[in-house]
Amino acid sequence: MEFWAVVGAGNWRKSSTIRSLTGAYGMKPSWEVDVLGRKQSVCVMTSAPQESSFHNPAQVIAQVTASKATHLMIALRHLGTSKAMYDADAYISAFLAHRWTLKGILIVSPEPPHAPLSSKYGASVDYAPTLGWPPASSNAIANVVRSKWGL
């Protein structure tokens, strides 16, 4: 399984950026997306799993595995909400421990000083064009990684 993560705070265009990158617009287990010029089955999660207390990293792994997709694109919040205390790194680390391959992380809002993904994942991290309010448009954000991610 190869995966990409779009990470940011609430209301920073994570979901609309993923829709811009994939063309996914509704709920279904997987979408056919052009990846490096070939149609691939991508599990698209436009809502961050931290927004529900029922989606810890192990549950996301099980859901993605059940989808039979070969790729995952997921929205993650930097930090967990009061209901779900897992931060973005907890999900990314769990995916890597499950032997999934990290293809890229796109950060769309300022990183909290105590939860920097950039120091841990280095070259896999890209940033939205502007990290101030209001955020850049979803298409401008998607353009930062579209060719690098092969989409």
Image (tube, grey):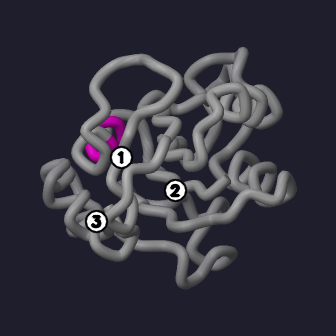
On the rendered image, what quadrant is the C terminus found in? bottom left
Q: Which residue was labeled with disc 2?
A: 4
* Extreme-right residue of the structure: 97
In this rendering, is residue 121 above or below 74? below
Front residue of 42 and 120: 42
Q: Amino acid at mark 1?
A: Val
The residue wearing badge 3 is: 146
Q: Is residue 146 visible?
A: yes
Residue drawn at the location 55% of the way across and 45% of the way down: 72
Q: Earlier in the sequence, mark 2 or mark 1?
A: 2
The part of the chain drawn in magenta is 14-18
Q: Secondary structure at mark 2?
A: strand
Identity of the amino acid at label 2? Trp
Give x and y (percent) for residue 82. 66, 23
Element under disc 3: loop
In the picture, measured across the screen, residue 92 lies left or right of residue 111, that is right
Label 2 to label 3, Cα distance in Å?
A: 11 Å
Crowdedness near tag 1: few (<14), some (14–19) or many (≥20) residues, C-alpha within 10 Å: many
Do the CB atoms of the residues marked 2 and 3 lie less than 8 Å apart? no
Residue 48 position, x and y percent, is 52, 32
Residue 13 visible in rendering: no
For label 3, the crowd category at 10 Å Cα-Cα, with few meaning under 14, some 14 to 19 and many 20 or more, is some
Magenta residue check for 129: no
Q: Residue at x 32, y 68 (%)?
A: 145
Residue at point 19%, 48% (across, down) = 138
Instruction: Report the residue marked by disc 1.
Output: 33
Amino acid under disc 3 = Arg
